Amino acid sequence: MSPLFPLTLRNVCVRRRGKSVLGPINLTVENGPPLVVIGPNGSGKTTLLRVMHGIERISEGSLEWAAHSPAKHSYVFQHPTVLRRSVVQNLAYPLQLMRVPKDTVSQACSAWLTKINMTGFGDTPATKLSGGERQKLAIARALIRQPDLLFLDEPTANLDGHTTREIEVLLGQASATGTRVVMATHDMGQARRLAAHVIFMKGGKIREQGTCEALSNPQTADLAAFLKGDIVT
Amino acid sequence: MIRLLFAALFASIFTTSQAAEMKLAVTTSFENSGLADVLLPAIKADIGLDVQLLVVGTGQALRLGAAGDVDAVLVHSRPAEEAFIAAGFGTYRREIMYNDFVLIGPLSDPANIAQATTADDALRRIAQAQATFVSRGDDSGTYKTELALWMTAGLDPDSFGPWYRAVGAGMGAALNTATGLNGYILADRASWLNFGNKGRLRLLFSGDPAMFNQYAYLPVNSARHPSVKGDLALMLETWLTSGRAADLINQYRIGNDQLFVFNATQN
Amino acid sequence: MTDILDGLIAAFWLIVTFDAVLWDISVRSLQVSLTALVIASAIAIPFGTFLAVQRFRYRRLAISVINALMGLPPVVVGLVVYILLSRSGPFGVLGLLFTPTAMIIAQVIIITPVIASIAHQAMRELWAEYHDLLISLNATKWQRIKTLMWDGRRNLLTASLAGFGRAIGEVGAIMIVGGNIENATRVLTTAIALETGRGDFALALGLGFVLIGLALTVNIAIHWLSQTEREGRW
């Protein structure tokens, strides 16, 4: 059981240039299955993730973790950033930052290369990878340091089905081994496949939340429209 | 391996020379004559002195002496030298040798200065013809001589039209400009004889005593600048006024022409 | 046109006969400019990287100043360094005037802004790319700088070589602070100025071609050593 949870957000608001982008948000996050944030573009999903990760400043309200020990977060962006190095050097980088000894690093790198089905790509310059391969690398790099939390911002938005499936398997494994997964996505099907707890956002506020089954009976018109595939404004 | 290479490359830059050495500021006209290439090795052989030449204009040479950045100067501009001494930067001047200035101009000689009787007459003809004339226009001995000649001719360069080009450069650069413009120019004989880009220019007038050019040696006042090597400057002075120097200077030729006349007196 | 041909021939003979004077001034040119390059890079590259990464109050001003300093006229730098190093000046006691050290000092002043400006630009672009990632990985300030400098090393090399180009071809400043003394502070550029002033264009051009050859050789050697154009590298 992670002592970090529950995470409590009370009246959290984020304002940029006077405009309210997020909030007010009142949310309690317990440990558990992957948490998925869905909603139309501009609904504040990314901002919520960044607030929870700690890289976005809150204009109002409070965000509190249960424990105050420094948590290990990892963040995977929608457009994967790779270092201008080889694949294996990318994987090793987070461990090097933490001064992990060399043997442990190489072991972990080999293990993860296998897990993402990229053995043999070890020495390839990461910039030469395809979008899907980069995203797998980014996720492996995020998970290699065994973080307490993994945030993902629409990670499979631009990827083919095969790669998407591979990634969902990785996320499932991560969740099973104690990493709390928090993910923003468009894809309700993905939420269902990850057996996730779902938050639906619109206009910077949370409109509905619950398990996947619960949300297949939407309470609000917005969610109903969203699930049908209509544009929600 | 690469480290060794770099070490070797840079080691020599920081080693200091063992021979006695001093710095002498000289004018571009002296350097251009080529006399230094004869004198310096002889000085090294005779008295073991390494003379490092800084070749600059007369004004800069005296400025370096005034700042104490050189140990002595060898220039050819009496009024400037006397001002130097009056200001206390040097205590005396020692005449060594003289050469002369010549008037150079285009082969076609539009101002007809080849027929002039005196130097100022020649300059007057140039002004009347408004022929292109290149002037040093800097703080050099050559320029000061040129101004003195204009004054003798009763003319004021400030009133001249665009035919008069003041370049503000050394002798070589000014000669290059004269070649490029095919104009007249006052130069010291040595620089002219050694100049490699004569183009269509020729030596048209010389011989007027007003164009004689006296070189003097001024040691920098060591009371003013203790870091100056007064003793070495004195050694050099003794050599420059010796019979040995007299021989070397008087026998120096470019082609068949003697350039300098030794006239140091023993005191 | 014949002058240029004569120049090429002069260059050829100088090199083939291992002319001692040519050797002396060429080696000194390399010594002065390479030393200036190393010192200037050691100052400029960390500084340029720091400017890209650290936000502080007068950052924009600092960047503008560095870019503007690229336009410092070398001959003015030479004059100022001369005044500082002169016996009558504040640092006269060091006796550095008219030595290769003075030339190195002047060149360091001239090329540091060039290297810093290009390095900063390269690091800034790379930082924009790496920013979110490095922050989310909790990299310390020092770790970020090291990562940027290593991953951006090829662009930093370009910055350095730009500085080298400026140094090896510079003549105004080193003429004033070096004095162009034969066997002591004469280098290729000052020798070219001297021979031009003597009207010996063939020799001046010959030296010029040697200088170009030298600069190209250094650049090619450095690129080869760092394998910049190897397949798969970037």
Image (tube, coloured by chain):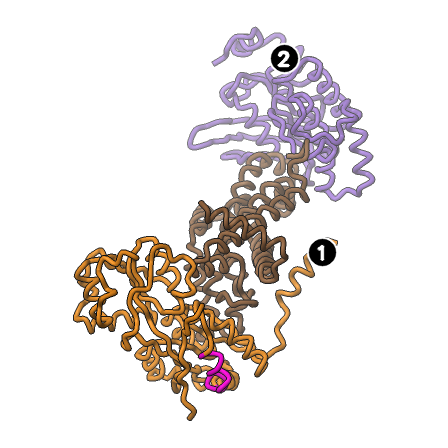
Chain colours: A purple, B orange, C brown
| Magenta region, residue range | B238-250
Q: Contact, CB < 8 Å: mark 2 with mark 1?
A: no
Give the prevailing secondary structure in the magenta stretch.
Answer: helix
Residue A194's disc is: none
In the image, taking residue B44 as reference, residue B237 lies left or right, namely: left
Residue under numbered circle 1 = B3
Compared to residue C68, the image places residue B243 above or below, namely: below
**Residue A179 visible within the image:** yes
Of badges 2 and 1, the one in the foreground is 1
| Chain that bears disc 1 | B
Amino acid at dot 2: Met
Residue B244 colored in magenta in the image: yes
In the image, taking residue B150 as reference, residue B168 lies left or right, namely: right
Amino acid at dot 1: Arg
Compared to residue A143, the image places residue B6 above or below, namely: below
Q: Please identify the quadrant where the N terminus of chain B is shown.
A: bottom right
Which is nearer the eye, C84 or A63? C84
**Residue C160 visible within the image:** no
At a point 55% along the width and 21% down the height, the residue shown is A206
Q: Residue C70: x and y, percent?
A: 45, 50
Q: Residue A189: x and y, percent?
A: 65, 11
Q: Residue B105: x and y, percent?
A: 29, 60
Which is nearer the eye, C88 or B54? B54
| Helix, strand or loop for disc 2 | helix
Q: Residues within 10 Å of mark 2 (few under 14, many from 20)?
A: many
Residue under numbered circle 2 = A188
Q: Residue B252: x and y, percent?
A: 46, 75
